[in-house]
Image (cartoon, rainbow, N blue to C red):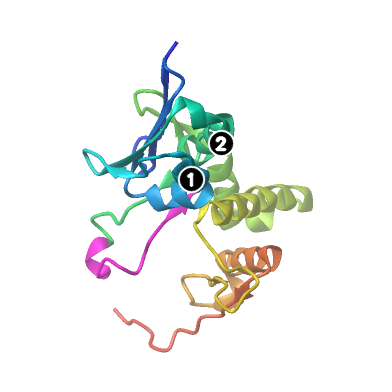
Amino acid sequence: MAESTVFNRNRSAFWLRVNENDDGSLNFFVSQDVAAVVKHHFPELEQASPTGWKQGNNNTENIWVPENRVDQVDVDEIKQWAQFAGNQCVWLKLGNQLQDHFSGSEVDYCIAGDFNFTTDGSDTIGPRSVLGEAEFQLKYHLGELTQEKKQEYCTVMSQSLLDAFDLLPLRGIGTPESPVVSPIPAQEGASKLAWAFAKHVAERKGVDFIEPRLLVQNHR
């Protein structure tokens, strides 16, 4: 029996549909915003398809894998990856408040591990998500937390950043073309949690950490 599975969150740029067809073939449809990410993680799709990736409707790309080549593709692995990448994480675009400050080419991907608050099917806001609670406590109640709670929340935050790093279509780690990690904003340097987390990610992933310096202070 044919089966179609969609991976997407409301207000997220990530959208992927996997069609498992009656004839045993597979179709994959992905939003152009994250097509390069899917291609990076699963190059076997193009290798298994006699037709390759095609432009689709509504800013999508699609690819077909015939029944006699589906053994070259682990569809369960792709769906498991998409369950996290598409149904857990939030892929953000430049919103109205930010787009005027960019020319359009500086930011390729912006990934949030989750929303700060949980929502139900009708987008009714519920309690803070696990990640949202960790961020809230570390930002606003750090001095009141026990060492055990600090460690718990730091682990939640750092693991989310490490997982997001792994989703990015990065190449060349361990070579001169290796990516680098840098915290933003740069003000007050190492006293910021963002600075500490960025340095931790760089150390765990074996890439360079760049310390930014704010040369001109914006006075309002």
Q: Residue at x 27, y 54 (%)?
A: 95
**Can the viewer see residue 58?**
yes
Q: Residue furthest top?
A: 1
Residue 102, image x and y in percent?
Answer: 27, 69
Residue 176 locus on image (x, y percent): 59, 79
Residue 101 percent coordinates (x, y) = 26, 69
User: Quick one: quadrant of the N terminus?
Assistant: top left
How far across and down, in percent of the image, does residue 39 sit? 45, 49
Q: What residue appears at the point 67 percent right and 58 percent down from the top-left corner? A: 143
Residue numbers of the magenta segment? 99-112
Q: Amino acid at mark 2?
A: Gln
Residue in view at x 25 percent, y 70 percent: 103
The local secondary structure at tag 2 comes to helix
Question: Is 101 in the magenta?
Answer: yes
Q: Which residue is mark 2?
A: 72
Query: Given the image, on which type of amino acid does mark 1 rest?
Result: Gln
Say whether disc 2 or disc 1 marks the residue closer to the N-terminus. 1
- The numbered mark at residue 47 is 1
The reply to whether discs 2 and 1 touch (Cβ–Cβ < 8 Å) is yes
Q: Which residue occupies the foreground of this view, 72 or 185?
A: 72
Task: Specify the principal SS of the magenta part.
Answer: loop
**Compared to 41, does 6 lie above or below?**
above
- Answer left or right for 87 relative to 160: left
Residue farthest toward the right in the current orientation of the protein? 148
Foreground: 70 or 203?
70
Write down the quadrant of residue 193 in the picture.
Answer: bottom right
Give the residue displayed 56% in from the left and 80% down from the top: 211
Report which quarter residue 71 is drawn in.
top right
Determine whether 88 is above or below 18 in the image.
below
